[in-house]
């Protein structure tokens, strides 16, 4: 079973992916991890990707897909994979379908986690962490006991530079620009399920389970 998981930054995709991995025994694959591994191990694909990055150009879709297909070799019989943040473009989606078709596989379910932009911004810009012990906080949802101080007393809390309002708005805008055509692509294939991500983590988990069960039984 191949599951594609789409969701904007701050939607809680990480938490839900973890749940899916545990519940369905899926392999968790992201193109970022695949790229890192191939570059680190200096594989042929990794070296090709590196040459594009050295020139400051984007790694082409077919190369990204080849790396992901290489990761999917490790899928055990009967299990599957969850593709996190991949495909990112129509080009990648088409290449992926073509590559999967060769192994008589296909994308079985596309989960599209949807969260209102204003909520995403609040979730991301409120994140703080302790630079010493790594503890994570949120100014609204998980505030420290003393303002802007780590509960363990190590340090003042800091914010990641790409979690500031302006950067977040850009990340969300880019996500919508890239993902809307992808959603249409999968809608045409009829294998996409929209999940309301505005509700609590448990409720989101529940709707994902229902969607997974419906799609995999059908
Ligand atoms: Zn700390």
Image: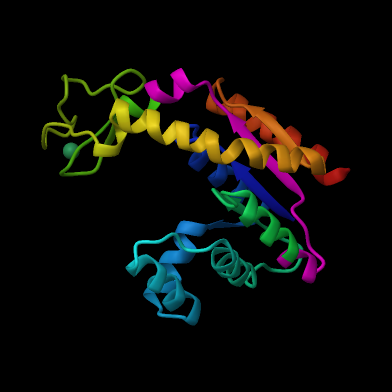
> Which quarter of the figure has residue 162?
top left
Instruction: Identify which residue, 199 or 23, lies in the foreground.
Output: 199
Instruction: Identify which residue, 85 or 134, lies in the foreground.
Output: 85
Which stretch appears magenta? Answer: 99-122
Asked whether residue 138 is drawn in magenta, I would say: no
> Which quarter of the figure has residue 210?
top right
Asked whether residue 102 is drawn in magenta, I would say: yes
> Which quarter of the figure has residue 103?
bottom right
**What residue is drawn where x is 39% and y is 33%?**
170
Residue 107 position (above or below residue 160): below
**What residue is drawn where x is 49% and y is 42%?**
14
Residue 198 position (above or below residue 57): above
Residue 185 appears in the rendering: yes
Q: On the picture, is 111 further left or further right than 29?
A: right
> Residue 98: percent from the left, percent from the top?
74, 64
**What residue is drawn where x is 31% and y is 28%?**
166
């Amino acid at each position: 079973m191949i599951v594609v998981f789409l969701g904007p930054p701050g939607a809680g995709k990480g938490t839900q992916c973890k749940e899916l991995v545990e519940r369905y025994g899926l392999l968790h694959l992201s193109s970022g991890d695949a790229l890192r591994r191939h570059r680190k191990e200096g594989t042929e694909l990794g070296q090709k990707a590196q040459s594009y990055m050295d020139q400051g150009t984007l790694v082409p879709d077919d190369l990204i897909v080849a790396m992901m297909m290489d990761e999917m070799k490790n899928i055990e019989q009967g299990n599957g994979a969850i593709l996190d943040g991949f495909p990112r473009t129509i080009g990648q989606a088409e290449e992926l379908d073509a590559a999967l078709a060769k192994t008589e596989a296909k994308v079985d379910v596309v989960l599209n986690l949807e969260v209102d932009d204003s909520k995403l911004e609040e979730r991301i810009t409120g994140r703080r962490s302790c630079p010493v012990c790594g503890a994570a906080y949120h100014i609204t949802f998980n505030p420290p006991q003393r303002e802007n101080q780590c509960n363990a007393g190590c340090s003042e809390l800091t914010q990641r530079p790409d979690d500031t309002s302006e950067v977040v708005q850009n990340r969300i805008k880019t996500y919508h620009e890239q993902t809307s055509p992808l959603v249409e692509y999968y809608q045409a294939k009829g294998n996409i399920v929209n999940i309301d991500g505005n509700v609590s983590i448990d409720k989101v988990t529940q709707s994902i389970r229902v969607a997974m069960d419906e799609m995999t039984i059908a």
